[in-house]
Amino acid sequence: MPTKKPSSTKKNTQETAHDALKKLEEENTRLQQELTEKNDKYLRTLADFQNYQKRMEKEHSTQKEETKKKYLLELLDLTELLKKAYEDPDPKPGLKLLLENIDKFLQKEGITYIDCKGKPFDYQLHNAVSTIEQSDCVDGTILDEIKKGYLVGEKLLRPAHVIVAKKKQ
């Protein structure tokens, strides 16, 4: 007669299930720890980014105020020169000094005048306010400048307002 082994098989199956359950619990604990670590890392990174944003906003605000202060001080100097020229019985030398100071300031800031009279019209630099028909000129030539145009470096600050020639038919 065969011996009964079902109880040992049942015991082995229970031990195997118990081992598998223990392994799953360990894996679950490991994954929970990993999730906690990653969550902590995420929260620290988020806090660092928020601090960076606040610092950049503060620096931008400070830089903006410093730039404003710089230009206001320049404007005050020019205003003082204008007042002195106004109070002077012969204001011409004072006005000349004021204009020279303004030109120096503009030059220091990299602002240049767009020379356009007699040149061909360029829609990127000029704004045509009027056209005049003439028979003795090239079509599209700038005849006169109503308002000066300026560049800051290579970028357009303000287009020149010009009168453009149109060849008579």
Image (cartoon, helix red, strand yellow):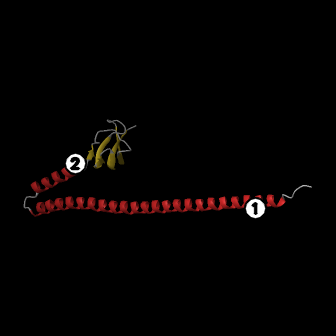
The residue that mark 1 highlights is 14
Residue shown at 46% from the left, 61% from the top: 46
The residue that mark 2 highlights is 107
Quarter the C terminus occupies? top left
Element under disc 1? helix
| In this rendering, position of residue 122 left or right of residue 46 | left
Quarter-of-image position of residue 135: top left
Quarter-of-image position of residue 34: bottom right
Is residue 159 in sight in this rendering? no
Residue 31, horizontal then vertical, whole percent:
59, 59
| In this rendering, position of residue 121 left or right of residue 99 | right
Residue shown at 7% from the left, 61% from the top: 89
| In this rendering, position of residue 79 left or right of residue 66 | left
Query: Which circle's residue, 1 or 2, is located before the other in the chain?
Result: 1
Element under disc 2? helix
Quarter the N terminus occupies? bottom right
Is residue 143 in sight in this rendering? yes
Residue situated in front as seen by the camera: 15 or 45: 15
Badge count = 2
Residue situated in front as seen by the camera: 106 or 60: 60
| Mark pair 1, 2: CA separation | 90 Å
Foreground mark, 1 or 2, reads 1
Q: Which of the numbered marks, if any, corresponds to residue 121?
A: none
